Image: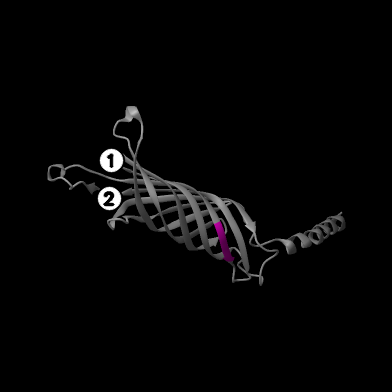
Amino acid sequence: MKIKKSLAIILGLVLALPICAQRDPFKQGKSISLFIGGQSRTETAINKEISSKFNMGLQTNFAQIKLHKGVIADMLCVRFDIGLDLNYAYYKRLQDTSNPHNDKIDWNPHQAEIGVDLGPSVYVAPFEDVRELQFMAFYHFIPSASAHIEDTNVYAAFCPMMNFGLGVNWKFIGIGYEHRWGSAKYKTYDIEDAAEGAHDTGEKTKFKTTADRFYIRFNF
């Protein structure tokens, strides 16, 4: 009976060897990243810049396409990421000083984007005995729908955002840094009369956005 059990164990190990040998140490499914940091917005026509009081973002990778077979040099993997990108910023208070009688009229601008996250990422696992420890870099293009809200004005545009970042992953969790930027000409809508809805004023304003953020990433 013991001989049969021993033979079964040995047979199981032999059958498992090919699977273990072919296992991709870089195999990874989906991921969710939470970002927090600082963002600034510049109205380029008058070079007016404001900084955020609060900025956060969410990125999900729901598809990662490996761009090669196996693992390069037994330590490197390159993938193309496809995901969803959400961004929100709450800016410091603006004050309308165009009229001395309106110096108490002020507001906090808001900015939000939703876009598709597209681009390559590179993963490096330099330590053969610790494949779970991986260093990564990414560069993504994020075509986004973007909106700014200031008092009774809403600015809306298609804004091509870009980002690059560095990070380190350990098994199911990672941390890193991201720089993000983009600019576009925004249509201006007046929403002062809510009953009539948004009114296109015909004006356009160019805004440039930059952000530096840190993130925590969950891999699954």
Please identify the residue farthest to the front as the structure is shown: 202
The spot of residue 73 in percent (x, y) is 66, 72
User: Residue at (66%, 70%) from the top-left corner?
Assistant: 74
Residue 111: image location, x then y, percent: 37, 47
Crowding at dot 1, Cα within 10 Å, few <14 / some 14-19 / many 20+, comes out as some
Residue 123 sits in quarter: bottom right
Circle nearer the N terminus (1, 2): 2
Pinpoint residue 106: horizontal percent, then vertical percent.
Answer: 22, 44
Name the amino acid type tagged 2: Lys
Kindly identify which numbered label has been placed on residue 92: 2
Start-end of magenta stretch: 119-123
User: Please, what is the three-letter code of the amino acid marked with disc 1?
Assistant: Asp
- Residues 14 and 184: in front is 184
Q: Does residue 122 lie above or below 50 as drawn? A: below
Residue 211: % across, % down: 39, 57
Dominant secondary structure, magenta: strand
Q: Residues within 10 Å of mark 2 (few under 14, many from 20)?
A: some
Q: Secondary structure at mark 2?
A: loop
Alpha-carbon span between mark 1 and mark 2: 13 Å
